[in-house]
Structure formats: structure tokens, C-alpha cells
Amino acid sequence: MSAPNAPALRILAPAAWAATVADELVERVRAEPRLRLCLPTGDTPSPLYARLAELERARGGSFAQATVVGLDEWADLPPGDPARCDVRLRRELLDRLVPPPRFIPIDVDGSDDEAAAREHDEVARNLDLAVLGLGMNGHVGFNEPGSRPDEPTRLVRLALSSREAATARYGAARTPSGGITVGMARILEAREVWLLVTGEHKAAVLRRAVVEPEGPDCPASYLRRHPRLTVFADEAAASLLG
Ligand code: PGA
């Protein structure tokens, strides 16, 4: 699984993006009710989660037997902080699904983050679907630039831009310095990978990730090693793909 493949590109009108991805996700989980998937947090998936919650309010139950595995988490934000990935995922999606799926967050509230990361590495094996956002610096999860494709789930130091996003964009009470992320090795082992990318501000990094040669400066570029990668981009994000 090392030669880059061409990802399946789904380029969508901005107004149709969330509804299309939501329909596809519901279709997946209905076809395979016991789906094990990881889900990202951030601004990109928020409209998708709003749409999923709306769809499920109407028809319900699709995620009852699914398992959602935490993708990443700030290591040093207190429980309940609004920027925490577990808090945000519960608030935006999981608490709005009836019944909610099983959720296995990353345990950052104990005394040993390294041990928690090792434990979560086992949880993150055998994912059916890894759903990811794309950072402005090319990260996926908290696999920051410099990450290798064979790395497991682990405790990482965060890039400055990620630390700043916690407070400036996501409302964290303080600036976190580290995080735990499902590693690229586990992501590349997932049966299928979806990369979600919206907005003109992501156009250059999406081009870097899927067109230019792969490299450690852009961990998302390693996703092309996966034989079943689908990129769900809106037209603005896809505008430099040529
Ligand atoms: P965003 O974050 O969806 O808030 O742009 C993506 C990421 O940094 O992974």
C-alpha cells in the first residue's frame, strides 16, 4: 500500500456539500449497521453534523449499532472545555442521534497520556471508515507536518497553528500544547478513508495533498497510499485541482 493512487474526487456545490456527504454516510451505516468509524471535529464537519442530526430526527436509528472512535484530542484541556473534541462531537452530533452510537473517546483525563495513547491505538485498529478533516498545514487528526505514514496513535506536540486554533477558533479556555491522535498507520489501515475539505482557504493545501508529490510536510498527502480514498470537496476548495 505504498504507491500513490488517484483518490476518488467528489466535487460538490457548496450548498449541496453537507447534504450529499450526510446522505452517503447514512447510506454506509444503513448498509453496515455495525460500522466502526472515526469522525473529525472542526469547522468543516459542523454543517455535515447538523444535516445528519436533522436527517436522523426524521428517520432515526441509523447509528444505533455503530461505534464512533475518537480521532484526536487536546491533551491538556479540562473535561467539558468547549474546544475539546469529545465535547464538540457529542454536542454537534452524538447527543442528537437517538439512540446514540457507542462512542470511545480518547482518555486524556487520566495521569498517563502515553498509556492512554497506547490503549487508544488498539481501539483504532480495524476501522471500517476514517473520516478526516484537512488542516491548513496539511495535518489530518493531529498528525502534524513531520509525521510519518507508519506512526501509531500517540501523544504529539502540536503545531503552533493548531494550538492557536484551539483558543482563537474553537473557544478553548487556555492554549493546549499537546494532543493525542490516531496515527497515520491506523488511518491507512482503515478499510476506507474520506477526506472532507471545504472553502477557498483550503484550496492550496488540498492541491498540495492530492496533486503534488507526497511528503512529510503534508501528512495528508500520505492518504493517497490508500486504495479507497474519497475526497469530498466543495467547489471552492477544489478550485486549484485543475
Ligand atoms: P477545520 O479544521 O475543519 O476547523 O478547518 C480542520 C483541521 O484542522 O483538521
Image: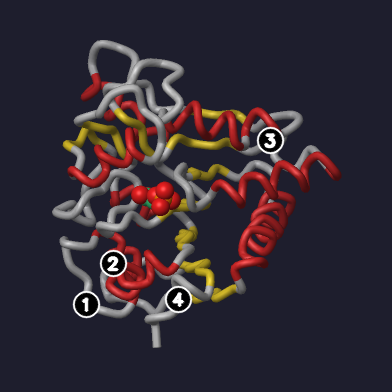
**What's the amino acid at mark 1?**
Pro
Question: Disc 2 marks which residue?
Answer: 221
Frontmost of labels 2 and 4 is 4
Q: Is the Cβ of the residue at disc 1 closer than 8 Å to that at disc 2? A: yes
Q: Position of residue 60 (x, y in %)?
A: 81, 40
- Would you say 87 lies left or right of 154 here? right
The CA distance from mark 2 to mark 4 is: 15 Å
The CA distance from mark 3 to mark 1 is: 39 Å
Residue 198, placed above or below residue 96:
below
**What's the amino acid at mark 3?**
Gln
**What's the amino acid at mark 4?**
Ala
Earlier sequence position, callout 3 versus callout 2: 3
Q: Residue furthest front?
A: 168
The CA distance from mark 4 to mark 1 is: 17 Å
Question: Disc 3 marks which residue?
Answer: 65
Question: Disc 4 marks which residue?
Answer: 238
Q: Residue furthest top?
A: 111
**Along the line of sight, which residue is nearer the eye, 167 or 48?**
167
Does dot 4 land on a helix, a strand or a loop? loop
Does dot 3 land on a helix, a strand or a loop? loop
Q: Residue at x 40, y 88 (%)?
A: 242
Q: Quadrant of residue 110?
A: top left
Q: Residues within 10 Å of mark 1 (few under 14, many from 20)?
A: few
Q: Is the Cβ of the residue at disc 3 closer than 8 Å to that at disc 1? A: no
Frontmost of labels 4 and 1 is 4
The CA distance from mark 4 to mark 3 is: 34 Å
- Would you say 161 lies left or right of 90 here? left
Question: Disc 1 marks which residue?
Answer: 213
Does dot 1 land on a helix, a strand or a loop? loop
